[in-house]
Amino acid sequence: MKKRIMFSLMGLLFLTACGNTSDTPEMESSAVNMNQEEVLYQGMVAEVLENGLLVSELNPIDREDAAGFSEVILLMEDTSAYSDLQVDDLVEVTLIANAPTTMSIPPQIPGNAIIKIEAVK
C-alpha cells in the first residue's frame, strides 16, 4: 500500500513539474492583423445566394499583381447587409491580399477574407 501511495505522489509530482511554465498569454492564430494589406476589386453580381454572392468578372482595380476571377462566390454568414444588391449590380469588393480560395469551380472566398462589399452607384 505504501508503494502505491509513493508511486502516485511521485507521478503527481512529475506531472506538475512538466507543466507549462509560460506566464505569457498565447497569441491566437485567428487574430486579425491591423496592418493587413488590402486589394480592391470590382465586379458584377451574377446571382444573390443564400449564403453569399456569385460575382462575375471580379478584377483588381489598383493592382496588377493580384489575381482576377471570371466567376467567384463570396461566402458570408450574414447576408442581410447585402440584401439590397440585385443581379447585374456593379460592386466593389475589398479583400485581404492573397485571400484564400477553394479549388472548386467556381472558386469560393471565405468571409474572413472579405473586408467590405459596396455597390457602385
Image (cartoon, rainbow, N blue to C red):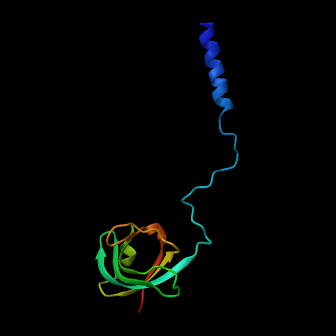
Q: Position of residue 109 (x, y in %)?
A: 41, 70
Residue 9 relative to residue 54: left or right: right
Q: Nearer the viewer, residue 32 or 121?
A: 32
In the image, what residue occupies the spot 64% across and 19% down? 9
- Residue 53: image quadrant is bottom left
**Quarter of the figure with the N terminus:** top right
Q: Nearer the viewer, residue 88 or 64?
A: 64
Q: Position of residue 70 (x, y in %)?
A: 35, 81
In the image, what residue occupies the spot 61% across and 18% down? 8
Count of numbered badges drawn on the protein: 0
Residue 26 relative to residue 73: left or right: right
In the image, what residue occupies the spot 46% across and 83% down? 41
**Quarter of the figure with the C terminus:** bottom left
Residue 74 relative to residue 62: left or right: left
- Residue 13: image quadrant is top right
Question: Extreme top residue here?
Answer: 1
Q: Position of residue 87 (x, y in %)?
A: 29, 84
Q: Position of residue 81 (x, y in %)?
A: 40, 76
In the image, what residue occupies the spot 66% across and 30% down? 16
Q: Nearer the viewer, residue 70 or 75?
A: 70
- Residue 17: image quadrant is top right
